[in-house]
Image (spheres, rainbow, N blue to C red):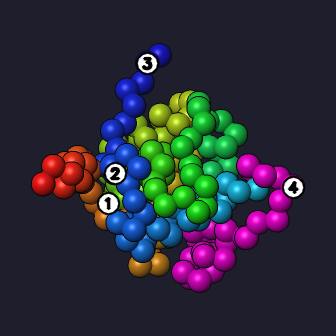
């Protein structure tokens, strides 16, 4: 079965400095969560600290962990999640932001293709409730992911290219 890959509303390799607080929280939490999976013998900062600081540890952290445990267990492919210090956004990090933004606006039908790109159907069904719970916890904690549009992603490339020829 062929699935069309979702198109991100974030530009490829978007500089993190262009992201807002809520977006940076999500990306840094994911990168921290991934660290022990990439380097199981290393000593890594606890990803839950940010959830405590944001006041969403009881509602957001369990759903976040369930979502990414499901993804880590059943992913169709390796996701583009960058290292903690990388100054640019990975493709799947951008899709995660898009997913959460859509779920915060209860646009489940628009968000579902993102999860379906990452996971087989049964796992995608299991991942949707914690994704929705995480999105809601973020919003309740004042961390609303902005609703971006594809044109904005393309425009940032155009602007940078235009600057080179001026």
Q: Is residue 109 visible?
A: yes
Q: Residue at x 51, y 54 (%)?
A: 131
Q: Which residue is mark 1?
A: 105
Magenta segment boundaries in residue numbering: 37-65
Tag 3's secondary structure?
Answer: loop
Judged by depth in the image, the label closer to the viewer, 1 or 4, is 4
The residue beneath circle 3 is 2
Instruction: Look at discs 1 and 3 and give the one toward the viewer.
Output: 3
What separation in Å lies between label 1 and label 3 (alpha carbons)?
28 Å
Q: Residue 10, percent across and down?
A: 34, 51
**What residue is pinned by disc 2?**
10
**How far across and down, in percent of the image, does residue 3 sit?**
42, 24
First-in-chain label (2 vs 3): 3
Q: Residues within 10 Å of mark 1 (few under 14, many from 20)?
A: some
* Residue at 45% across, 45% down: 91
Cα distance between the residues tagged 2 and 3:
23 Å
Query: How far apart are the alpha carbons under marks 4 and 3?
Result: 37 Å
Q: Are marks 1 and 3 in contact (CB under 8 Å)?
A: no
Upstream in the sequence, badge 2 or badge 1? 2
N-terminal of the two: label 4 or label 3?
3
Which-is-in-front pick, marks 4 and 3?
4
**Is residue 63 found inside the magenta-colored segment of the image?**
yes
The location of residue 6, given as percent across then percent down, is 37, 36
The residue pinned by badge 4 equals 41
Q: Within the magenta stretch, is there residue 33?
A: no
Q: Nearer the viewer, residue 140 or 117?
A: 117
Label disc, if present, on residue 68 of the rendered structure: none
Residue positioned most to the top: 1
- State left or right for residue 47 relative to residue 133: right
Residue 158 in the image: state x and y as whole percent: 19, 48
What secondary structure is marked by label 1?
loop
């Amino acid at each position: 079965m062929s699935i069309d890959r979702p198109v991100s509303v974030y530009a490829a390799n978007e500089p993190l400095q262009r992201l807002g607080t809520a977006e940076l929280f999500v990306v840094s939490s994911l990168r921290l969560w991934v660290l022990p999976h990439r380097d199981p013998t290393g000593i890594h900062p606890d990803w839950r600290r940010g959830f405590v600081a944001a006041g969403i540890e009881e509602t957001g952290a369990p759903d976040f962990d369930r979502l990414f445990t499901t993804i880590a267990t059943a992913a169709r492919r390796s996701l583009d999640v960058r290292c903690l210090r990388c100054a640019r956004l990975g493709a799947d990090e951008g899709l995660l932001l898009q997913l959460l933004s859509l779920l915060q606006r209860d646009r489940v039908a628009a968000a579902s293709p993102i999860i379906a790109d990452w996971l087989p159907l049964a796992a995608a069904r299991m991942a949707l409730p914690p994704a929705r719970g995480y999105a809601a916890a973020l919003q309740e904690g004042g961390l609303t992911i902005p609703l971006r549009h594809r044109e904005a992603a393309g425009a940032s490339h155009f602007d940078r290219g235009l600057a080179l020829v001026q």
